[in-house]
């Protein structure tokens, strides 16, 4: 969706959920001295300034990472946040491409797609170590999967501004999993007040009965805001991820 710009929402509680999980997964996967491939279908600009007017206007970061940063003391996510701020200033916030580029190593490979022209150009500057693709994210994923190295991770994080995405995402994940059966696949989805995610999740659960599904609820960022939670659907989840997410869920229940 070319009208979507994540700067308005960067650092919100949904970002906290998915980025804490992503930081843990990448830290876990890089413990093994074998290269891996990171593929992301909807990269955004990769790095955000929480003092920008767009971020201040919605105040989602104020209710998000700025309110709950203390939850992550001693974790990989805290290390990522600290490194990003050390490099880019105290109000910098790392998107998933920046997190991946920071945590991955010199022999790992990153493929990131972004279709929005301005976001794509910013991503080129913010994540120079990656292969940045100016094309549809799923088209890019099909072109590189199964990747070399075969070991790796696919991240799918659409805007969901088009309702058809809820129907199309399962089709893409099922097809990609057939071509890359050993890949870890993380899908993020919003929990909205109309529960439109439920048919998508049912389809995915039938296709991937051993996948990990994790959802957290939280107060809306402002009156009338329809997002009241965040979901992750993980195919081939690394060992220990369910425990980490369970601890995080306890934190969210305190909100």
Image: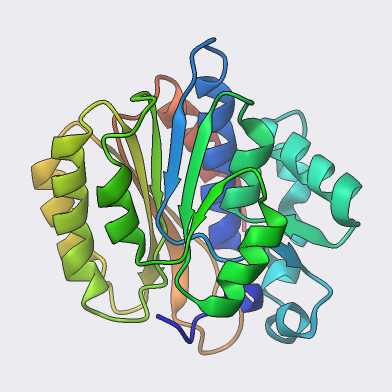
Q: Position of residue 182 (x, y in %)?
A: 26, 25
Q: Position of residue 142 (x, y in %)?
A: 25, 50
Residue 240 position by quadrant: top left
Is 2 displayed left or right of 65 in the figure? left
Residue 91 position by quadrant: bottom right
**Does residue 105 sit above or below 126 in this rendering?**
above
Q: Residue 242 or 53: which is nearer the viewer?
A: 53
Q: Residue 236 or 133: which is nearer the viewer?
A: 133
Is 193 displayed left or right of 199 in the figure? right
Q: Is residue 252 visible?
A: no
Q: Position of residue 184 (x, y in %)?
A: 34, 33
Tag count: 0
Q: Residue 130 or 247: which is nearer the viewer?
A: 130
Q: Tell me the residue at 15%/47% (across/down).
A: 174
Is 207 displayed left or right of 54 in the figure? left
Q: Tell me the residue at 80%/47% (across/down).
A: 84
Q: Residue 244 or 156: which is nearer the viewer?
A: 156
* Quadrant that contains the C terminus: bottom right
Q: How is the image coloured?
A: rainbow
**Does residue 5 sit above or below 17 in this rendering?**
below
Q: Looking at this view, name the residue that lies furthest to the top.
A: 33
Q: Tell me the residue at 51%/89% (across/down).
A: 224
* Quadrant that contains the N terminus: bottom left
Q: Tell me the residue at 29%/58% (across/down).
A: 138
Q: Position of residue 237 (x, y in %)?
A: 35, 29
Q: Is residue 246 visible?
A: yes
């Amino acid at each position: 969706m070319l009208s979507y710009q994540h700067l308005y929402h960067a650092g919100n509680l949904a970002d906290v959920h998915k980025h804490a999980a992503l930081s843990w997964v990448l830290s876990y996967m890089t413990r093994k001295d074998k290269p891996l491939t990171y593929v992301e279908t909807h990269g955004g600009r990769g790095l955000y300034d929480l003092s920008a007017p767009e971020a201040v206007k919605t105040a989602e970061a104020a209710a998000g990472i700025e309110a709950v940063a203390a939850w992550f003391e001693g974790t990989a996510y805290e290390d990522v946040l600290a490194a990003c701020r050390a490099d880019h200033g105290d109000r910098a916030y790392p998107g998933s491409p920046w997190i991946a580029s920071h945590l991955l190593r010199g022999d790992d490979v990153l493929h990131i797609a972004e279709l929005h022209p301005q976001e794509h150009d910013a991503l080129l500057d913010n994540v120079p170590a990656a292969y940045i693709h100016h094309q549809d994210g799923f088209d890019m994923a099909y072109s590189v999967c199964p990747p070399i190295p075969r070991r790796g991770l696919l991240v799918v994080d659409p805007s969901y501004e088009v309702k058809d995405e809820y129907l199309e995402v399962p089709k893409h994940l099922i097809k990609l999993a057939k071509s890359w059966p050993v890949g870890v696949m993380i899908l993020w989805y919003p929990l909205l007040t109309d529960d439109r995610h439920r048919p998508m999740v049912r389809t995915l659960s039938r296709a991937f009965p051993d996948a990990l599904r994790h959802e957290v609820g939280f107060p809306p960022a402002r009156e009338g805001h329809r997002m009241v939670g965040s979901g992750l659907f993980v195919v081939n989840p690394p060992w220990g991820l369910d425990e980490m997410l369970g601890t995080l869920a306890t934190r969210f229940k305190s909100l």
